[in-house]
Amino acid sequence: MEIFPEHVRHLWNEWELRTLVLISLTWQVILIRHGSRRKHARCSFVSFLVWVTYLSADWLATVSLGTLANDQGDQCKQDSNHALQALWAPFLLLHLGGPDTITAYALEDNILWIRHLLGLLVQVSVAFYIYIRSWNTSALTFIAIPVFVSGIIKYAERTWVLRSASPEQLEESLLSAPAIQAPDLDRSYGNPELEYVHRGYYLFPVLRRLYANLSLRFAESQRTYKLMVKKEHVDDEEKQSNYAFKLVEVQLGFLYDLLYTKATTIYTLPGLIFRFISVLSTLSALASCVVFLNVHEHEYSGVDISITYCLFIGAILLELYALVSLLFSDWTLNWLVNKQSSLQNFICRALSRCQKRWSGELAQHNLLNFCIKKRVTRCLGNDFLFRIYFPMELYWQRTWEDVDTDLKQIIFILLKRNQREYGLKRFDYNFLKDLLSYKGDHALRFHGEIMWSVEVEFGHSILIWHIATDICYHSTKAAEYQKKKWEASKRISNYMLYLLLMHPFMLPKWINRITHIRNTFREAIRILQREQLSVKDAASASKLLIQMNTQSHRPLEQLRREKAGKSLLHEGCRLALQLQNIYSPCDIICDVWLEMLTYAASQCDWGAHAQQLRRGGEFLTHVCLLMAELGLSKQFDIGRKESSVESQDDGWGCLKSRFLSSYK
């Protein structure tokens, strides 16, 4: 018994290859348009679209080649249309080469470059098989040759880029790379965007070595400090912080291009030459094909002729889009830095207005706001359903806040203070290790009564400090001058909870993390939903929790013993009460969160930082790089101080003297 009737099977056989080829072309258009957007987009739809198209694009091209090879083997001598369809094979190699804006979806693709090399050998062999089986005296046989050249170049280019971005090859290339040479710090750029790109490019080798987990010489930390701290802004913390974070943003943009795009190849002389050959080959093939089909149009199917033209036009438009992307990029702008021209000014204006190098947003999760949502109680009674529903609700309740100037300034002031203390200790490496190990304990050194809150596991500390911060934020009156610190504390608190819930791989490991988190949330939901008539928002929820811990209600500690198991809600409320008894809790809370943020940044592996670049970037990564380039990183090999450091030609001895004297 046949499931599909004869006419349906005939229609499918006739349109199977055509449909696959057109979908493959469509997928390339989607990838080149949206592949680079994930660099700065937090939109879940963009991420999902890129994920689906990237994973299925190679499969579509491979299946199309297989179908085409099968058709050529069976019918190439019986149907002249198959000679025209054989011309599609090199276009499928072009599709397998992928667009310039995305070569790797994740870092694992770079590691598996050898798999792509094997795919290159196999798919090129299949394409040649199709070409040989369709060989005849027709001009189409020779028209296919330049398209083959273009397709092989693109596919080989992708494989080479993946290999170059693999950890082993990246480390090998960096071992022989020369030390960073600082640009002229006294030159006039004429445009801030040009200055950011030029200085960011000179700092980029340091970021590459940080990512490859290679040590850096102590002298390099001195040079990076000179580049990061602009002397014209020494007395203006706001301008200095914006300037430093902008340099960090530019460097991370370069790192994204290195790991996920073809930038390392196309922005080189050989890459440009091969790109010129590829474009010229496609254009010459198109011109020849137009002339041939105008003469022999009646011999071929109108549908196949239209698809062939679509493939040619699509390939050329993709190259034009790639050319525009190449021109309007930081790589081109850096190349033009010493060439005063109208093109340079035009690109500077375009980049300053249009380009986004990362999302510029701080993800937020708030425990109290989460727990007062009415829909979270639906699955509370069933443990299995709650485990399924909880991560879904976490995903939908994410919010985003812009990373504003005030937050950058507060963080930068802390890092400059740490850098000052490090300098006053004559760059003692043991002191640096202690400095990077602060996770709130240094801020609480004069408040031993609450030191217990940071002497637990780091994730444990984040959760109880988040609860305490939220309660204090809504129940403590802040002076006008403290509002910036309160807002910064609130944002960092919500951001750190977001990392703990959604990206725990960026934080130190926490034993029983899932159990503690679920029990804390479930206990908070039970309490707040039981009093739902009096709980309207986070402020009223904070008031209720304090009342339950201090007045005639059953203490939270008793509830914890009875139902909550490993819930940390009681500890958070206890900490909030202790903070309210301290003079000016705002300053302490802000300092603790800043230390937690910098501790998490310094402890996170650069592989995890790099993975987040494809999801819009994480603010934690920006803080980590800023710390490193101010010299606050264990990867700077302080033990290898050269005896000649003080007398180097770069004038570091004078800089060090000015640096130390500026803080006295």
Image: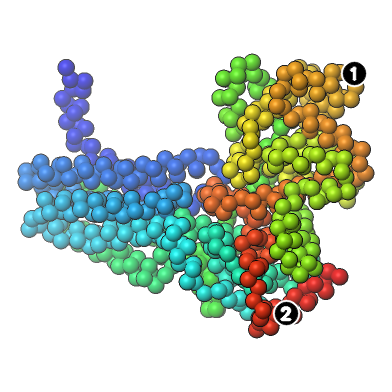
Q: Secondary structure at mark 1?
A: loop
How many numbered marks appear? 2
The residue labelled by disc 1 is 552
Q: Residue at x 64, y 76 (%)?
A: 642
**Vertical comparison of 1 with 362: above or below:** above
The residue labelled by disc 2 is 653
Please state, as top left, top right, bottom left or bottom right, where the C terminus lies in the image. Answer: bottom right
Q: Earlier in the sequence, mark 2 or mark 1?
A: 1
Crowd tier of the residue under label 2, counting other residues whose Cα lies within 10 Å: few below 14, some 14–19, many 20 or above? some
Three-letter amino acid code of the residue under disc 1: Ser
Q: Position of residue 533 (x, y in %)?
A: 79, 18
| Closer-to-camera residue (90/368) | 368
Q: Residue at x 68, y 69 (%)?
A: 225
Q: Position of residue 278 (x, y in %)?
A: 30, 64
- Residue 449 figure quarter: top right
**Vertical comparison of 546 with 664: above or below:** above
Please state, as top left, top right, bottom left or bottom right, where the N terminus lies in the image. Answer: top left
Q: Residue at x 63, y 79 (%)?
A: 184
Three-letter amino acid code of the residue under disc 2: Gly
Res 23 seen here: yes
